[in-house]
Image (tube, helix red, strand yellow):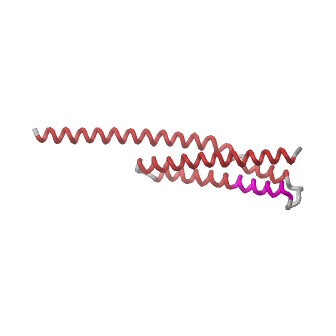
Amino acid sequence: MLTYRVLSLLLSLAIILISCNDKLKQEVKSKYEALLKGHDEVMPKTMKINKLKTELLASVESLSEYDSLKIEAVSISSELQSADDAMYTWMDDFGKALNDIKDLEEKSKRYDELSEQIAAIHMQTEDAMARANNLIANTTK
């Protein structure tokens, strides 16, 4: 009778552990899909940054290096480059999390961090691009 209870207890524990592991796998999968969505929202914009930087700097090319618009354009160009660099660093970190981290709990935590980062990169990219487009519009009037 005691052996039956011990076996029942062990079987119950095994079922609970398997159930928890399945839940964690689903959670990690959901976070992965959210990260892909974040990537897919930001990456097309990131791919436009170099062209936008070229247009931005060309729009103030004829101005003196001391002109406030040219100084602002150079600053915005640096912000665009920073956003571009952040996106490529994020993609490298995402690849490492995806391929190198095997422990699901650790992967889940890393995916949470990456989610916060891609949201910040999205805002950084949007802001820098909007500022660049606004300055271009104001210099080509």
In magenta, the rendered stretch is 67-81
In this rendering, would 79 be left or right of 89?
Answer: right
- Which residue in the rendered view is the most extreme toward the front? 68
Q: Position of residue 23 (x, y in %)?
A: 39, 39
At horizontal 80% and vertical 51% (from top left) the residue drawn is 56
Q: Position of residue 84 (x, y in %)?
A: 67, 52
Observer-nearest of 84 and 135: 135
Rendered-image quadrant of the C terminus: top right
- Is residue 77 highlighted in magenta? yes
Rendered-image quadrant of the N terminus: top left
In this rendering, would 85 be left or right of 8?
Answer: right
Count the numbered circles shown. Answer: 0
Q: Position of residue 74 (x, y in %)?
A: 78, 57
In this rendering, would 115 be left or right of 130?
Answer: left
- Magenta region, mostly helix, strand or loop? helix
- Is residue 90 highlighted in magenta? no
At horizontal 79% and vertical 45% (from top left) the residue drawn is 134
In this rendering, would 120 be left or right of 26?
Answer: right
Measured along the vertical axis of the image, is residue 61 above or below residue 14? Answer: below
- Which residue in the rendered view is the most extreme toward the bottom? 66
The image quadrant of residue 137 is top right
At horizontal 59% and vertical 44% (from top left) the residue drawn is 39
